Amino acid sequence: MAGGSIGTKGVAKERAKEYQGKVTSYVIIACIVAAVGGSLFGYDIGISGGVTSMDGFLQHFFRGVYEKKKHAHENNYCKFDNQGLAAFTSSLYLAGLVASLVASPITQNFGRRITIICGGIFFLIGAALNASAKNLAMLLLGRIMLGFGIGFGNQAVPLYLSEMAPTHIRGGVNMMFQLATTLGIFTANMINYGTSKLEPWGWRLSLGLAAVPATLMTIGGVLVPETPNSLIERGWNDKGRNVLERIRGTENVSAEFQDMVEASEFAKSIKHPFRNILKRRNRPQLIMAIFMPTFQILTGINSILFYAPVLFQSMGFGANASLYSSALTGAVLASSTLISIATVDRLGRRALLISGGIQMITCQVIVAIILGIKLGTVGELSKGYSVIVVIVICLFVLAFGWSWGPLGWTVPSEIFPLETRSAGQSITVAINLLFTFIIAQSFLALLCHLKYGIFLFFAGWITVMTIFVYLFLPETKGVPIEEMILLWRKHWFWKRIMPQEPEINGSTNATGVARSSNVAVTVGMHELSITFLYLNTI
């Protein structure tokens, strides 16, 4: 096995240069099958907005909204403002939040595969309940079951992809989850476009077809192998090494295997992962697990994708035109993810996040200006301005698709050490679903009260998150997962937060990493860092 010793805590030596192996068909097939789990999340995001704009659905469950919608002079921004309608969309994400916390110990103790299978089964039950719903209670129960499915799937699939992928293409492989999500959104939008012509029952078909990706996810969970990290963590070292050799296409995996074993030995000594994740040595990862999913939702993308048909109708587009426009944005999102997959392991995470943030800010401001000047509370946008709005929203979606869309999941899934990986991913999913729930529940009311200012609201948040990435997120491109802990010690800010080397490795020089030179920072950067230093002292 590769040389190097382990101290009291975690991986003690950087062995990345000793890793060997190639991209095998075995790992590609396993990752594609697992990534299908992302299509569940995407399908629901895409299907919800279309269904909530269908007359047959509104007449059956939300007749008050249907009557308001038919009023020709109803306020453009407020015609869909209904908390019951918002609850239909948002209830799923609150259930997913709870499910992700339950899924964490299951993922750690029983493996990634069983969690994926459970997620698929929950989604199947939810799809059946929604398609056959007779009343609002049955509809919401189905949504809750779908939420459990998403909570389990979003917990396990990103971890599975990160652990199966070779280090040099981990970013691209992990983005298969986001690609599947975007394809799910696009597919849902196209289905909505077709089923909208099948009034008054087309909405049942839209909701029921969620069973298709759920079935694929369940079958895929049965067929794919468990990750070597999970097998080693549960004491099956020989089996873990066999799987590692198969997915790397070589028997010379000693360095990578040794890193996994060392990380596993430390992980077994951790009895309370959620308590351990609060310690200083895990503070940078915890901050990222909270802020990355929070910022991802505060881009405003889910509001556009949830309510795209509703949003476009509010701008004066007809029902069919609004569904067509939302299908277009879904197609743009799916294609833009391919850009990210092709560039993330060459350009790095930071470059994509920052460039995407700048483009999204620009697009949000342009849409706000057009709506503020050209669209009142009644009436419609002219055809020319409507086309401009759709184009700019597509540019916004394009930027999100290569940046915060995939990387909001990729970065948190690859930065945690094994002993807190399941807990960290659980926090990421829970935070993501919490803010998804908050935005989904409040968006229609915010749209009614802020009007075009809703786009400026999200532009402000994107500005904050772009600055955050520039200052506080180190580049993780090409860094092995098990050695990620060493990266934070080199960062200009996080090295102040991390405990001294003896606390991590049991010896002062165990990491073999030269101490970073002092970094001069600007006064502005120093002021921003004070907040985090203060939180660290609490």
Image: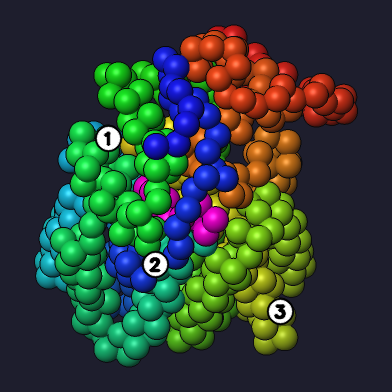
Judging by the rendered image, the residue that carries numbered circle 1 is: 233
Q: In what element is the residue under mark 3? A: helix
Q: Position of residue 472 (x, y in %)?
A: 68, 34
Location of residue 368 by image quarter: bottom right
Number of numbered discs overlaid on the protein picture: 3
- Distance, label 1 to label 2, CA atoms, is 23 Å
Residue lying at 58% horizontally and 30% vertically, measured from the top left? 486
Location of residue 46 by image quarter: bottom left
Judging by the rendered image, the residue that carries numbered circle 3 is: 388
- Distance, label 2 to label 3, CA atoms, is 45 Å
Relative to 69, is 267 above or below? above
Q: Nearer the viewer, mark 1 or mark 3?
A: 1
Q: Nearer the viewer, mark 1 or mark 2?
A: 2
Residue lying at 66% horizontally and 22% vertically, measured from the top left? 495
Relative to 177, is 19 above or below? above
Hey, what amino acid is under mark 3?
Answer: Ile
Hey, what amino acid is under mark 1?
Answer: Glu
Q: Quadrant of the C terminus?
A: top right
Judging by the rendered image, the residue that carries numbered circle 2 is: 24
Hey, what amino acid is under mark 2?
Answer: Thr
Q: Residues within 10 Å of mark 3 (few under 14, many from 20)?
A: some
Q: Magenta segment range?
A: 158-171
Q: Are marks 1 and 2 in contact (CB under 8 Å)?
A: no
- Distance, label 1 to label 3, CA atoms, is 53 Å
Left or right: 441, with 298 as reference point: left
Q: Position of residue 531 (x, y in %)?
A: 68, 21
Q: Residues within 10 Å of mark 2 (few under 14, many from 20)?
A: some
Relative to 120, is 463 above or below? above
